[in-house]
Amino acid sequence: MSIESPAKNWLHAPTGTERAWIGLALLWCIVLTLAMPYWHFKGKQNSTGEAYTVEPTRFADRVQQFVDSNKVGEVNGTPIAEPPPGGDAYLQAQMWRFYPVLQFKKGQTYRLHISSLDIQHGFAVLPINMNFQVLPGYDHVLTITPTMAGEFPILCNEFCGIGHHQMTGRIIVTE
Amino acid sequence: MTKEEKSGDLIEKESEHRGDGLHHAPGTFTLTLILLVSFVVYYFANWKALADVWHVR
Amino acid sequence: MTTLDPTVEGALPETEAAGRGNHPPGTFRVCATTGLTVDLAAEKFIKINAVFAVVFLLLGGIAALLLALTRWSAVHLLNAEWYYRMTTFHGLNMLILWILFMEIGILYFAATALLKSRLASVKAGWAGFACMAVGAIMLDAVILAGKADVMMTSYVPLRAHPTFYLAIILVAVGTLIGVINFLATVYIAKRDKTYSGSVPLVVFGAITAAIIAVSTLLHGAGIMIPTFLWSIDVIDHVDPAAYRLVWWGLGHQSQQVNVAAMVSVWYLLGTLTVGAKVLNQGVSRTAFLLYILFINLASAHHLLVDPGVSAGWKIWNTSYAMYLAVLASMIHGYTVPAAVEVALRKQGHTKGLFGWLGAAPWKNPGFSGFFLSLLIFGFIGGITGVTLGTEQINIIAHNTLRIPGHFHATVVGGTSLAFMALAYYVVPLIFRREFPLRWMCRAQPYVFAAGIVLMSLGMSFAGSYGVSRRSWDVEASGALHPVSYDPSVHVWLGVLGIGGSLAFVGLLMFVVPTVLAVFFGKRVEAKMPAW
């Protein structure tokens, strides 16, 4: 009875199928626990949270510097910047745009710095569906390797005011 | 408890509480096994989906 | 059994005194159906909290319908401003107000009726209720006035009107007073020896919920007070990363309060509907204990792709140390239906593996609601939750529609449905009113569950294509850089819309008979009519 005090000495080890289920569930919990450190060392997709504090205005300066020295074109009025393979790329999030458009080479690795100039934003790469959080005051560094070529829309997925759904950008990956 | 009180809304006496002996619940055990199998399939399908996206550290 | 004569004064014989706990004469009645003593003061609070809960459920439900009809691309009902406003409104009314008012009612019931105790303090009861009610009304008013379009999470430095933060603080303080009043009641019941041995399992679960609630509400105060001061320019900066960490100590833990309360309700309804007995008190109680010990680590689930948190920290926390709170839920997921199975087998339904399940009282909405809640919580909510909360898998889930797809299966298909099922007993037993429209009550859990399952699947599939969870316009028309998805996304958003609308019908099928019963229902004079 769940609504009455139990008889005295109610502490017993589980038996039968209950015991079997608890054992199975515990085993599964151990698998779940080990999967994450395994992937951390062996997997190719990890969010390590590498980040540095940065003043939003300082970050905006770095972004502009990056665009000035790596600009390779322009799309819809937004400059396209292509960092050297292995180099640093900067992406600035603000209400309600991403700046600049980034161009990467497939299979090359980049250190992508993302931060916000105003409030919290999200960084989602479509249609492959990768998502990261973007905070003002934090330079979030993703060491990223695009594995396919094409044009990838990026989208803010953290609510950031009335223009939230129109906050988009683009990453171009060339062969 | 009297026989006519078989249906739902009744509260048994504490003295009827038979303690925590062996019980027989094969249906529930089967249900939980189905749950575990669905869990395993869904979980690893998600790892597979993750393995297909860009590399990131 | 009839109500004890409230005019009897003076000491009762020893045995009778034990039967009525520590209630002073004239302050309680004995329930004709269950034999439980019902403290009249507590009963008043249970009623008033339940009424407020249902009002906020209805408000949140109307917002839910509007949102579902907006995300359904073919309908796209609201404009952007009202879509975001209603998202804020829906989240707070459902996740905070409906659930907290209901839970205070459940706590008061568990401590008084199940422990044969009077309520520790009637004054504290009123104070807590007043804080919650005033806070709740302020909260809804400031959101509807358009001064707080910040979502339930209100991540800094996005700023709402100070009233918004103050209102949340008031609701939290009121709830905290209620929870402390509950714990004090448990204490005086123990002191006055109103029960012998250990507390009943349902009370144990309620104590679990209360302990997690205290921790939750302290986190809430810890972040909402500085944020309120920031909103009135007393302090000039609240760190956004620190805000997220502490806020989720409120946001996620409060959902774990729901889990503990819901599991307690499962055990309670198992007993009320089929006379289920706890199979192993030690196992069930240990599982509750695991919730207390490990569940507050779960706020890490929301920070898995955040800057500044290390892999080690995330793995430890997101796994609740070692998935021990998940283990707890998997244990309850066995013990609750197994108790039902054993009870039904004992009543003669022994055919095959699932003969007992076929013979279960599926026409009793208290049973069907409870069992559907168990299935939806386990099969959809639980499995998706653990998977999405895995450190690395979160990369393909964070802030997409997969997240609400998960938590609508836990909090709505699980907790809300269990609370609705409970109401089918609360109204006849506490309000002592009969339900009219009994056919509607019988069908309600099925309609609601079907709607929520459809909606949850629609969200989950749309989200797996990367559809953002709080976007007014999936296609981002007019944006500088166009966005396009797999076209099947719109099919799934349609499923979301249809499921959400169906769930709203199910919600009305709950609210209408409940309101009619409470205000116009036939009085239950003796035993409650069996479902």
Image: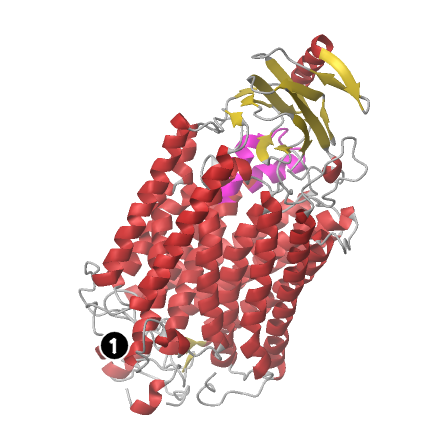
Q: Where are the magenta residues, as a range? A: C224-250
Check disc 1 and report the residue beneath it: B14
Q: How many marks?
A: 1
At 67% from the left and 25% from the top, the residue drawn is A171
C200 relative position to C523: left or right = left
Residue nearer the viewer, A103 or C471: A103
Residue nearer the viewer, C455 or C287: C455
Q: Looking at the picture, how far across and down is residue C502, in whole percent?
A: 64, 66
Query: Helix, strand, or loop for circle 1?
Result: helix
Q: Is residue C242 magenta?
A: yes
User: What secondary structure predominates along the stretch shown in magenta?
Assistant: helix
Circle 1: residue type? Glu
Q: Looking at the picture, how far across and down is residue C346, in whole percent?
A: 28, 79
C479 relative position to C128: left or right = right
> Can residue C303 be seen in this snapshot?
no
Q: Looking at the picture, how far across and down is residue C365, in whole percent?
A: 50, 76
In the rendered image of this protein, does residue A75 appear above or below residue C505? above
Query: Residue C499 sits in which quadrant?
Result: bottom right
In the rendered image of this protein, does residue C78 appear above or below residue B48? below
Residue placed furthest toward the top = A69
Q: Is residue C476 magenta?
A: no
The chain ID associated with circle 1 is B
Residue nearer the viewer, C260 or C236: C260
